[in-house]
Amino acid sequence: MKKIIHCGMAALLLASASWAMAQSAQQFPNRALRMVIHFPPGGPTDFVGRALGQKLSEAWKQQVLVENRPGAGGIIGIESVLRAPPDGYSLLFGTGGSLALAPALNPKLPYNVFTDLAPITLLVINPQILVVHPSLPVRSVNDLIKLAKAKPGQINYGSVGPGSPQHMGMELLKSMAGVNLVHIPYKGTAPAMTELMAGQISAMFNSMPSVLPHIATGRLRGIAVGSAKRSPAAPDIPTVAESGLKGFQYVTWYALLTHAGAPKDIIAKINAESVKALSEPEMAKRFSSQGAEPAPGTPEELGRFMRTEFEDWKKVIKAANIKLE
């Protein structure tokens, strides 16, 4: 009899827990949420994150508070989300740098992005433009490759630091083209761009908002975009793949995630509302002004995309023998 009573109580508790979970998903969100962006305010991540946060706030009639938590290559922001209750009320606005490149570079991160975080949706893809100083006698990727082969180790390029997306994008190009270009790291985009426009460095991959105005004035020459297809923001600039390196793809991207312990029903609800917001023509127009392209999808698609990016960067890192100092 006691065994029957215990079994009955266990079944009742399980049913109660399932009912409570269903109710919490139906009522979600019933208070303010926060979206952690692991970059300082004012940049492209902030632009996209706040635009999405505003749309989610309007849809849910609850505030989505954006928290900028920069530092340590995204570690501070990610750990902030992982320390929060796993209830879906703390969202992570992550990037390809923190979610795929950093784990490939540093296997000793204090978390595992694939098991500790739950994917919600890919948000946008940002094609990067390969630009050169006008004094460099190249007008295409093929020209750059030919010049680099004729002058091995004599042409340099800039990035915002070792292991940064800009660094890795050029290392991918070097690996695929079989050329020797010299890496000059800087502490940020501004000094790298200043040196590029002064002719102190010859080339660099960078985001569209950073380089398109300078291409328009002739201070820089855009020779290719890293994405698989041409960007609507720069339709006259061919892709690297079109220009001779078939299969080349280097883009930066943003994604929405949360704590891996969050209920699946709540993750599905956040996904549905985010996809809806990103599919609005108004949002596409806002993002295109920054060269960004909405790319929403399912949590499963984001999970597979992250894993593919991680594996691809591991190959580049191994081929280039890149190690964190």
Image (cartoon, rainbow, N blue to C red):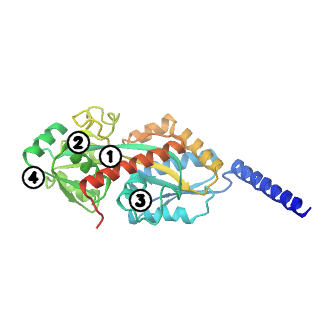
- Tell me the tag on residue 32: none
**Mark closer to the chain start, 2 or 1:** 1
Q: Nearer the viewer, residue 131 or 263?
A: 263
Tell me if label 2 and label 3 are in contact, CB under 8 Å. Answer: no
**Mark closer to the chain start, 2 or 3:** 3
User: Mark 4 highlights which residue?
Assistant: 154
Q: Residue at x 79, y 53 (%)?
A: 15
**Mark closer to the chain start, 4 or 3:** 3
- Tell me the tag on residue 39: 3
Q: Would residue 140 be seen by someone viewing this image from the given angle?
A: no
Dot 2 crowding, Cα within 10 Å, few <14, some 14–19, many 20+: some
Please provide percent x and percent y for residue 125.
Answer: 40, 43
CA gap, disc 2 to disc 3? 26 Å
**Mark closer to the chain start, 3 or 1:** 3
- Tell me the tag on residue 209: 1
Q: The disc labelled 3 sits on which kind of residue? A: Phe
Dot 3 crowding, Cα within 10 Å, few <14, some 14–19, many 20+: many
Q: Nearer the viewer, residue 267 or 38?
A: 267
Dot 1 crowding, Cα within 10 Å, few <14, some 14–19, many 20+: some
User: Mark 2 highlights which residue?
Assistant: 215
Residue at the far left: name it.
150
Which SS class for mark 3? loop
Which SS class for mark 2? helix
CA gap, disc 4 to disc 2? 24 Å
Tell me if label 4 and label 2 are in contact, CB under 8 Å. Answer: no
**Mark closer to the chain start, 4 or 2:** 4
